[in-house]
Amino acid sequence: MVRLLRTAGRYFIVFEVLVDWVLKIFRQKIFGGVSAFISPQELREVLEDLGGSFLKFGQLAAMRPDYFPEEYCRELLGLLDEVPPIRPELLNGIFLKEYGRLPEEVFQKFERVPLASASFGQVHEAWLKEGPASPARLAESKRDGSQGGERVAVKVQRPFVAEDFASDARFFSFLGWLLRRTGIVRTVNPSQVVREFIHWTERELDYFKEAEHLERLYSQVSRNKLPVKIPKVFEDYSTRRVLAMEFIEGRTLKSYYLEKTPPPQARKLFKDLIDFELYSYFFDGFFHADPHPANVLVSSSGSLGLIDAGIASEVSVSDRKKMARFARATARDDLEETIKTFLEMVRTPLLEMLAEAKRDYPQHWMRIQFTKNLFMRKIREELSSLLARWHKASREDGPVHEKSPMHKFMELFQLAERAGIRMPPAGVLYARTFLSIDVAILELAPDFNVPQVVTEFFDKFDGEFIKLEQTPDEIPLHLRQDLEGEETEILKMLDEELKTLDRELLTERVSGMMESLE
């Protein structure tokens, strides 16, 4: 009953805020004298009132001045780390629930004013006491070598944010279903994208998961000697809603972006950041998926730090191979290899139908081949234009939107939309990472040549690329040896049913296509 009332209350708040905004626009249109569009500050206030997931979308919009007016983006940048903080009495309540004590009793010293406050949580500066924060966890805790008085960053989750997100997730799931049923979005499966967003966010709300992410990234950096600083986690002081981490000194990249002043050793810094993300994605298969400017710290010497690993993801070996081949080919401006790797990476229903039709309708092979040639010529023209514009803009300091990898990915998605091609989920993950950071890099370092940096990356790590190519793909679930016999049979049956459904759908589509050709 309590959950039902909370959900109803959440929907009422969303409805009330949106209706107030719509009515305001109507009043402005009727009475005039004021712009009919919402101002940047008003938009930020609306998103802050809605909170949670809506703030996340505002954060994504803030990083895309190539899609939204600059004044809106600069205002929405505040959503990255300048959201109104948690009220003191609610902060006390969180600590009492998690530790049974107030913040000043958990830590040797705790700064009440947060260093940063974002959509789902805020960060405080604190100093450790000697020993674990909660005596109840002493027996099960693993000592991490922390000493009393050590300076830490303490991330505290906002109250009720998980409950609000659960309500929002139902709304977004319905929206994804609606977009899929109506066919408005065909490039990717909107329901799957929403499910991925929900999955990432649910993990982001579990600070034990974030602690695991930080530890994996910390291990990556140490093992591969990558020039990035990842904070270590103090497990004894961390809970599902409070996370204590090593304090990393530095200014956020966001502050440089707002001042329009490049950080020290900007080119090296940005190259290190891209190298780290690409190495993690392609060669380790686990990467920080949210490197927006408020999560990137720059020390006075120009070294790089990454914080807030709530959104991190794994990538399968087969997807990593396909994406690495495609990224390598595009960076080297190799059109033939780009076309080949693009078609390997995506799913192309038309080519599947044409291959099937060629077997079942040999008498129409000329028409079938003609259709395939038309399709391939269109793909070649589109990819050739995209590559030429990207490399030319990168060499000659062209417009940011032509140099942006994310912008080029959006063009790929538009090409896929027109050609009926399905982009892989791994491609969405890859694009999402660049969405957070590429414009900031290109605004602060206009001569930064992304294709050149990516080419240098693959040259530098050629051995790792060869190892990746030689790594076997994942074994299908129904063929794994570690599963029980009954589980294997169920998975095998499901796999066969899915293949049968795909086959029947393909046959039906081929039949319809051949009728239209005849």
Image (cartoon, rainbow, N blue to C red):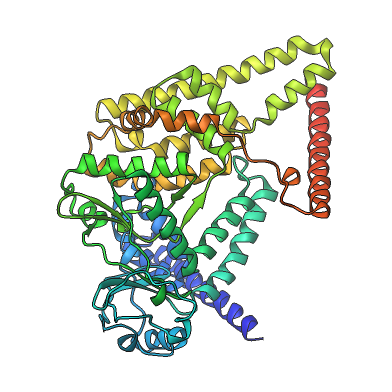
Q: Which image quadrant: the N terminus? A: bottom right
Q: Which residue is drawn at 51% across and 71% down?
A: 19
Please say whether residue 205 is visible from this viewpoint: no
Q: Which residue is drawn at 30% across and 81% down?
A: 130
Asked which quadrant contains residue 6, the reply is bottom right
Asked which quadrant contains residue 241, the reply is bottom left
Viewer-nearest residue: 179 or 480: 480
Q: Residue at x 17, y 43 (%)?
A: 265
Please say whether residue 193 is visible from this viewpoint: yes
Q: In this view, does 109 lie to the left or right of 473?
A: left
Percent coordinates x, y for residue 107 in the rendering: 30, 82
For the image, the number of numbered tags is: 0
Viewer-nearest residue: 93 or 172: 93
The relative height of residue 471 versus residue 139 in the rendered view (above or below) is above
The relative height of residue 64 versus residue 20 in the rendered view (above or below) is above
The relative height of residue 181 versus residue 512 in the rendered view (above or below) is below
Q: In this view, does 59 lie to the left or right of 492?
A: left
Asked which quadrant contains residue 342, the reply is top right
Q: Is residue 53 left or right of residue 361?
A: left
Percent coordinates x, y for residue 199 in the rendering: 57, 59
Percent coordinates x, y for residue 105 in the rendering: 32, 89
Viewer-nearest residue: 77 or 68: 77
Percent coordinates x, y for residue 294 in the rendering: 31, 58
The relative height of residue 369 versus residue 20 in the rendered view (above or below) is above
Q: Which residue is drawn at 78% across and 25% down?
A: 513
Q: Which image quadrant: the C terminus? A: top right
